[in-house]
Amino acid sequence: MITIDAKGMYYRDLNRLIREGIAKGVKKFFLENVNGQYYIGDGIKGDDIVINVNGVPGNDLGAFMDGPTIIVNDNAQDNVGNTMNAGKILIKGDAGDVVGYGMRGGRIYILGNAGYRVGIHMKGYNEQLPVIIIGGKVGSFFAEYMAGGVIILLGLNDTGDTGSDYFAVGMHGGVIYLRKKIDFSKYSKEVELYEADDNDMAFLKKYLSEYADSFNISIEDIMGGSFYKIVPSSARPYAHLYTSA
Amino acid sequence: MLKLKNKFGIERDISGCGLCGIINTKRVKTTGSDIKKAISVEHDRGNGLGGGFAVYGNYENYAGLYAFHIMYDNLSAKSSVEEYLKNNFVIDKEEPIPTSKTSKITEHPYLHRYFMKPKSDRQDKLFHDLGDDDFVVQSVMLINENYDGAYVFSSGKNMGVFKGVGYPEDIADFYKLDEVEGYMWTAHNRFPTNTPGWWGGAHPFTLLDWSIVHNGEISSYGINKRYLEMYKYNLSLKTDTEVITYILDILIRKHGLPIELATLVLAAPFYQSIDKMNNEKKELLTALRQIYGSALLNGPFAIVFGYSGGMVAMNDRIKLRPLVAATMGDFTYVASEEAAIRAICPSPDLVWSPRAGEPVIVKFEEPVPQKGRVIGL
């Protein structure tokens, strides 16, 4: 275990310290006084590595990450988990725009809100199943061009609509689960809304239990009531954009 | 040929740009060290080809006079511009803008400032009767367009812009902004896209009290430019951001639109959103889009603009550039990255990301008298 005081530290130096630590066999990192350092945990491997971040990490946190866990005790900026492959990112505050862009595996759990363009181009294949769970609400272009994986949008502590314009536009794979029904007519024409069935609820229970444990909240508060799911109407929504059916 | 202008090749780069703003609604002043600290967190968003600051409340002793900041390529440009100024303005004070000899900025134009007001018996009175503000605008346009090697980069009252080619923290040291105090600051770290990085092309862009810092690209530049040229604005700075400054001037100062409506012109709601509004709002926004279609800004942007009454930060309509805001007591902070705010305000009362096209408007508590007509909402 090592503690790094990142106050005023340039991102390259901080990331070098983390990489050197991993090479030496350090499994647990505590980063103190982080403020805006980019690329923390990018591309690192190792399922047993845990990085605790105190402060606001900079853009592209955990990009291309392949196994480790990053815990952020504050807000995070843009591009969290960009093209992440495996591992887990926990954010106890809000996340910025473009969370989980092109994500292909692993989990991103956000206690607060997330910004615009969450989970765009997210994809899954065989055992690779990326999962994003957002506790609050999200901005526009949520799940745009989503191709695989699962996003769960909880809308806890929020009275307004949890979604926004261009919701799931161009979605052609994967599943979105909603804890609150949204005014579906406002959104994409390329997706369909169903009530979650028993299989869905079993899946949700597994991931939401882990989510609740991560943030020390009660699973009953989250799981009480029904859930809805959104799936694409077609795997190839634009198959006939230029040709007749 | 003007050295100040366009001496770099034009190449395309990935856009970054960072911006920050600080306002205290009770007009409590901070030195430039706070904004410098904030913008320096966004160091990597720029590439050293432009940094700058706008400060309001820094010229209390000359608050009634127009403070011109002018950059000159050479002394002959200076003497010809000064001849124009002497013929048309009463110059209360003029001096070199204080700069540090020890900063990292080693190459720079002559930087001079003038505190002055238009003469009441100036020559142009023979042809028309322009108000002082209009005459200042005309003079700024004239100098920037017709006087080679000279460029007015600040012309407001009780405010000033300090900018140049370099990283913003170095520009702040160069102009010794640690010693300058103001109740509102904006800052910019430039990563030039499409247009050259030159001294005049650094942000903020100003005209009278308007100052603009901008991250993004104005795809509608062509139509905005043609619209503004009809109203005698000269667009000579080779940068898209310039249009925003002049659009604000025409909308708010000349046409008397309230700030709130002006922001709805810059980032007009889509018609599909307007369709869902109640009739009164629908009528208003449709009218704005019809009248001011050519003033709509298209393309990705986050901007912060300052004026004598306050500060406004906003995004384009689909939020293609980052913007975070925070409040702490009477202070409001805005920045491209939350970390920039946290560097000077570690525990804000409130932190949020403004929604697309939704302006954060912060006005001073005792507003200075508004000029022009006001159209009721």
Image (cartoon, rainbow, N blue to C red):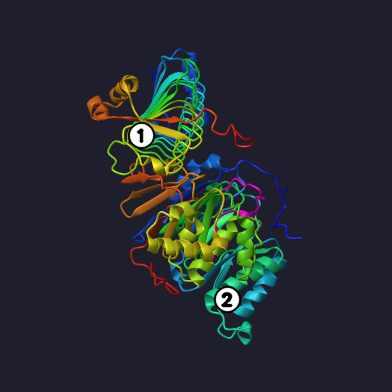
- Residue tagged 1: A74
**Chain of the residue displaying label 2:** B
Q: Is residue A164 visible?
A: no
Q: Crowding at label 1, few (<14), some or many (≥20) Cα neighbours within 10 Å?
A: some
Which span is picked out in magenta? B190-207
Classify residue A13 as left or right of residue B226. left
Residue underneath mark 2: B135
Q: Quadrant of residue A165?
A: top left
Residue at figure coordinates x 43%, y 64% from the top left: B283
B77, above or below A167, in the image: below
Identity, as a three-letter code, of the amino acid under mark 1 = Asp
Look at the magenta stretch and give its main secondary structure: loop
Residue A236: image x %, image y %? 55, 29
Give percent across and percent down for residue B44: 55, 39
Asked if disc 2 and disc 1 are in contact, CB closer than 8 Å, the reply is no
Dot 2 and dot 1 within a common chain: no
Percent position (x, y) of residue A50? 39, 19
Residue B311 screen position, x and y as percent:
43, 58
Q: Is B366 a magenta residue?
A: no
Q: What amino acid type is highlighted by mark number 2?
A: Phe
Chain of the residue on which disc 1 is drawn: A
